Each structure stands twice: as structure tokens, then as C-alpha cells.
Image (cartoon, grey):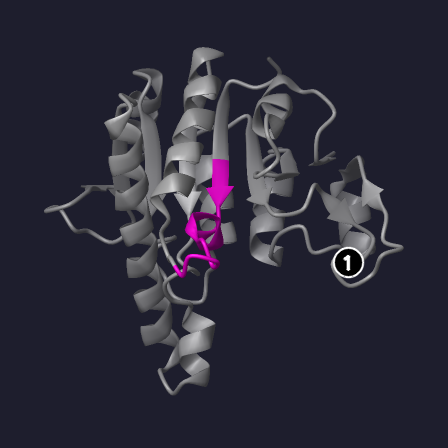
């Protein structure tokens, strides 16, 4: 295996099933659980930052008349809903977990404390981070980069619906080409939207490689974990 401790960034959309009209699909959660089981069997320590876009987005709320700060806090609460759903699904198949939140809500989750989070990982628990950074105007990409830095993660794995970083949006441009590997400098100079600027800078400054990969491609997450050719690696 190439990595040991991973920080997985899961968007809220990963929990959705639009065809069934479900914001949180139990079958999708079960599939995530099986992938986690395989990773743990190979020695992975897993931390997860979840988004909330399947339930609410602060920017979308702003367009509907909700002020941005309030909308962002609503989005943070949506990430906690996803974190609890993921926790329940993982524990149903015997994977021990802890949910830690950036906003204190002791009735349902632990507050984020760095040393405690690292101890959970060392004990083989999946740690699920909710409520982003706890601050408005910061995305869950930024939360993922921040938590990856704090827990000394070996890699930040960004789960998407495409199999890496392309020269253009492959959904819109059929001639777009995929990068196997990029340096941080190349990604910046080519203005490739790997993550938002704050998140990208954190990873670059703290020497945390980013792998963008197709989370829904069977076995892909294992290939990334083992260091095989999968997705796009962004590193120094």
C-alpha cells in the first residue's frame, strides 16, 4: 500500500439517487460501507469529510433570499445529517465510527479535538467530520484540506463522478484529456479546478498529495490507496 492514513472528501451528491428521488440512498450508503471494509482490511486509517449539497447549499440559499452566512450554517447542518447517516450505515456492518463536528452539538457527536481524532484513527475507527470548518464562507473542500493537515493524513482523496482532472469539463468537451499526474504548480498555472483555492493552498503548503478519482468505479478507491494508476495525482 502507498498510503496509511487517508482523508476522503465525499460530496453530498455521493449520497443521492436522483432517479429514485432520494437525497440519501441506503443502497449508496451500503456500497460506501463495503468499500470502507475493503480499505480497512488492507490497513487503512480512514477519516471522512462529508458535504451537504444533496440537502442544502449556502450559495443556493443566497439566491433564494437567505443571507450567505445563515445559508452556510444551514449547509453545515446538512453535512452533519450526512455524517450521521454514514455513521449508522457503517456501524450496521460492524465498522466502528466516531462523528466529530466543528460546531458543538454534544447530544449527537463529539466536538473536533485533534488529539482525540488521531487516537480514534489509531484504534481503527472511521472518523467522520461534519459541519465543515465551523465557519461560513469556507467550503467542505477547505474543511477536507484543513482536517487532512491536522491529522497528518498521507493523502487527500477527492471522490468525484469523473475519473480524474481534465484539460476541460469532459461532460461538455469531448476532446478534453485526462491528466495522470500534475504538480501543484501546473494545476495553478493551468487554472485547473482541482479544489477551491484555500483548500489547494493548504495541501500544497503542507505537502499533502491530492488524488481526484471516480468514486463510483468499482475497485477504484483500492487502486488509489495502493498507489496504482488511478485518477489524477496532484503532488510536488
Tell me, yes or no, if residue 154 can be seen here: yes
Asked if residue 11 is among those painted magenta in the image, a careful observer would answer yes
In percent of width and height, residue 125 lies at 31, 23
Name the residue rendered at 86%, 47% in the picture: 177
User: Within the image, what quadrant is residue 126 found in?
Assistant: top left
Q: Which residues are magenta?
A: 8-21
* Quadrant location of the C terminus in the rendered image: top right
Tell me, yes or no, if residue 113 can be seen here: no
* Quadrant location of the N terminus in the rendered image: top right
Q: Which residue bears the numbered disc 1?
A: 191
Name the residue rendered at 57%, 19% in the picture: 3
- Direction left: furthest residue: 107
In percent of width and height, residue 47 lies at 41, 32
In percent of width and height, residue 129 lies at 34, 42
Name the residue rendered at 74%, 43% in the picture: 184
Q: Is residue 93 shown left or right of residue 208?
A: left
Asked if residue 6 is among those painted magenta in the image, a careful observer would answer no
- Direction front: furthest residue: 20
Q: Secondary structure at mark 1?
A: loop
For this rendering, which residue is in front, 234 or 94?
Answer: 94
For this rendering, which residue is in front, 4 or 34?
Answer: 34
Amino acid at each position: 500500500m502507498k498510503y496509511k492514513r487517508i482523508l476522503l472528501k465525499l460530496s453530498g451528491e455521493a449520497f443521492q439517487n436522483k432517479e429514485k428521488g432520494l437525497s440519501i440512498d441506503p443502497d449508496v450508503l451500503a456500497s460506501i460501507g463495503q468499500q470502507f471494509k475493503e480499505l480497512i482490511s488492507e490497513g487503512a486509517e480512514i477519516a471522512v469529510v462529508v458535504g451537504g449539497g444533496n440537502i442544502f447549499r449556502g450559495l443556493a440559499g443566497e439566491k433564494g433570499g437567505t443571507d450567505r452566512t445563515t445559508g452556510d450554517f444551514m449547509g453545515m447542518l446538512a453535512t452533519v445529517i450526512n455524517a450521521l447517516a454514514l455513521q449508522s450505515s457503517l456501524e450496521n456492518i460492524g465498522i466502528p465510527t466516531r462523528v466529530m463536528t466543528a460546531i458543538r452539538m454534544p447530544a449527537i457527536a463529539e466536538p473536533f479535538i485533534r488529539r482525540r481524532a488521531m487516537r480514534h484513527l489509531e484504534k481503527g475507527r472511521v472518523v467522520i467530520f461534519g459541519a465543515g470548518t465551523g465557519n461560513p464562507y469556507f467550503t467542505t473542500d477547505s474543511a477536507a484540506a484543513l482536517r487532512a493537515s491536522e491529522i497528518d493524513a498521507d493523502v487527500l482523496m477527492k471522490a468525484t463522478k469523473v475519473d480524474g482532472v481534465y484539460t476541460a469539463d469532459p461532460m461538455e468537451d469531448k476532446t478534453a484529456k485526462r491528466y495522470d499526474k500534475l504538480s501543484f504548480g501546473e494545476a495553478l498555472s493551468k487554472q485547473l479546478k482541482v479544489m477551491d483555492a484555500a483548500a489547494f493552498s493548504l495541501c500544497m503548503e503542507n505537502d499533502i498529495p491530492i488524488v481526484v478519482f471516480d468514486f463510483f468505479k468499482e475497485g477504484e478507491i483500492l487502486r488509489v490507496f495502493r498507489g496504482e494508476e488511478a485518477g489524477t495525482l496532484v503532488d510536488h
